Image (cartoon, rainbow, N blue to C red):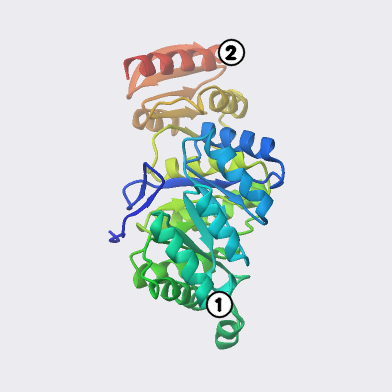
Amino acid sequence: MRNVKAVHIGRNTVLDGKHIYIQSMLNKRSDDIEGSVEQAVQLEKAGCEIVRAAIPDMEAVKLIPAIKEKINIPLVADIHFNYRLALEAVAAGIDKIRINPGNIGDMDRVKQVADACRTHNIPIRIGVNSGSVEKDILAKYGAPVPEALVESAMKHVEMLNRFDFDDIVISIKSSDVRTMINAYRLMAEKCSYPLHLGVTEAGTERMGIIKSAVGIGSLLVDGIGETIRVSLTDDPVREIYAAKDILKSIGMRKGVQIVSCPTCGRTRIDLIKTAAEVEKAIGDMDIDIKVAVMGCIVNGPGEAKEADIGIAGGDGCAVLFRKGEVLRKIREEDIVSELISEIEKIQQVN
């Protein structure tokens, strides 16, 4: 298990490896304060635990108090190029800053930001990605390979350490999944700072979720990563749902897990429709439960025994199981309602 330096964000959030935090980023225009506040609230309701907002100019600093008034999760300011924006964000009550120290000016400016953040106990995330690696490092390696990403990040760490600043979180993202995985593995060997995982510019929902699941999931099962973001060209709320599913799939977050077979020629019920209806009905339930929705007797009973509750399809019917015990035989048209009824009974007991 990786030994992680604890970093505090806001009042109640601690990055120490004991809990994987889900992040997202607002995509409303930075001058749309009302829309940004509404989106931040929606993200928190969906399960977002840390939210980031772009602060491209002084006008956008007004977002910080407006958003913080309405949410109970940490707010991160995404800053580039202008160190004064970081100073103003600190003054406005931001919980965390995301910068690349190398692109906000000379060392005096880096020192001012480090001093302000230290005084107010605000951590800094060093956010490196394959498109932001310095020219000299790119020339050295020839491409944004994992070693280049890590060297860039460590260069920025040294800048902050020079000014006695150590409340640091690191991200080293790439749109190439293999590069991202290898870069984070290398970084995990070199430092104990918390790592924020993500595949940058992952794409639209379909491919973005696949790339993120492979990249983020591979690292988490190896004990690497303290926060995650599934970056999608979509509604940020979709990022939260995807992140939750990744964590649930590897046993790092409680919730409903649905096991269903891909169907074959033996299937005699409309399993695709049934599984979709079950998922829609129970997917957001606040209960730690494994539900099996199986199409036939080949794997159905076995999977159902491994699940808390489940069905195995027959010819226009199904057998309902609970903890491996047969409860009863039910008609195909009653499968969803009967299954949900049993799940609600379990929920009441829990």
* Residue nearest the observer in this picture, 50 or 240: 50
Locate the N terminus and report the quarter of the image it occupies.
bottom left
107 shown above or below 341 = below
Quadrant in the rendering for residue 223: bottom left
- Residue 158 is situated, as x and y percent measured from the top left of the image, at 42, 76
- Residue 230 is situated, as x and y percent measured from the top left of the image, at 55, 50
Q: Which residue is mark 2?
A: 333
Question: What's the residue at 33%, 65% (across, down)?
Answer: 192
Image check: 230 left or right of 307? right
Question: CA gap, disc 2 to disc 1?
Answer: 69 Å
Comes first in the chain, label 2 or label 1: 1
Question: What's the residue at 42%, 32% (across, down)?
Answer: 255
144 shown above or below 215 = below
Q: Secondary structure at mark 2?
A: helix
Q: Which residue is mark 1?
A: 106
* Residue nearest the observer in this picture, 217 or 192: 192
* Mark 1 nearby-residue class (10 Å; few <14, some 14–19, many ≥20): few
How many numbered marks, from 0 up?
A: 2
Q: Residue flagged by tag 2: what amino acid is it? A: Glu
Locate the C terminus and report the quarter of the image it occupies.
top left
284 shown above or below 201 = above
- Residue 113 is situated, as x and y percent measured from the top left of the image, at 49, 64
Of circles 2 and 1, the one toward us is 1
- Residue 83 is situated, as x and y percent measured from the top left of the image, at 58, 65
Q: Is residue 50 visible?
A: yes
Q: Residue flagged by tag 1: what amino acid is it? A: Asp
